[in-house]
Amino acid sequence: MNLLEENTQKTVDLVLKQLNNFWDDTDAGVILAAVPATLEAMKANFKGSPNRRFYDSENDRVIFSPVYSIQWMIFLYRLSHQIYLNGEGSTPKEADQVYYLNKVMHSNDWFYAIDLPEHFMCEHPLGSVLGRASYGDHFFVYQGSTVGGNRSKGVLSYPVIGDNVILFANSTVLGDTRIGNNVVVSAGTQIINETVLDNCIVFGKSPELVIKTKSENEIKEYTKHIWGWEV
């Protein structure tokens, strides 16, 4: 089933069927109003991907199927986020319901109020927590990744993450952290209240990080299998 080639109502019906397993008060109109923009966001997210399960380059055709769990969890985040945006200052209960559905189905915590970028991808993202932060484009996470706030000296701060950043398994980015563009955060790395410059690979735990400086082309070469760009 490629939901981008089906009508909007079929997508709405599937979401409502899943939501109705937990709640009996979901407003179908709220879901219907948010699905078209969400599907457009999915097209933008996957277009040009070198992964043939996401994009058929020969036919310039984006593929979005609910049986691909990575795609469905990204869709549910984007749907909850769109419902939140449609609320224009209020938060419809359906944003919470879709957010909770994503947690139940996929064991992740991607809060609808955060603004994940146009190009966001993941692999095995069970246990990932994406909290308040500024996220750059072409952001990628693996299982157990955590992004969020940290309170230091009475001040609660949140990270700023640049473009083309990848968080490997069980990596942590917290607090007043600034991560530049083209950065690979290695598995198990913990970054708290640090500045990480562009074009590098990061290892270890704050305050004793190990940073290996690379060129932009080296990091782009390392990540082109994800994003499909030419180096």
Image (spheres, rainbow, N blue to C red):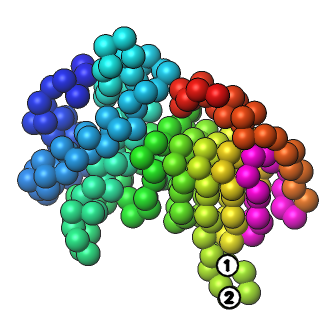
Assign a secondary structure to mark 1: strand
For disc 1, the marked residue is 151
Residue at 50%, 38% in the rendered image:
121
Indicate the quadrant where residue 27 lies.
bottom left
Amino acid type of disc 2?
Gly
Q: Position of residue 169 (x, y in %)?
A: 68, 40
Name the residue rendered at 55%, 29% in the picture. Answer: 229
| Position of residue 11 measured from the top left corner of the image (x, y, whole percent) | 18, 35
Q: Is disc 1 surrounded by few (<14), some (14 to 19) or many (20+) residues within 10 Å?
A: few
Residue nearest the observer in this picture, 17 or 117: 117
Placement of the N terminus among the 4 image quadrants: top left
User: Magenta part of the protein: which range?
Assistant: 191-207
Residue drawn at (21%, 40%) of the image: 15
Q: Horizontal placement of 45 versus 66: left or right?
A: right
Q: Tell me the element at label 2.
A: loop
Circle 2 sits on which residue? 154
Q: Is residue 201 above or below residue 220?
A: below
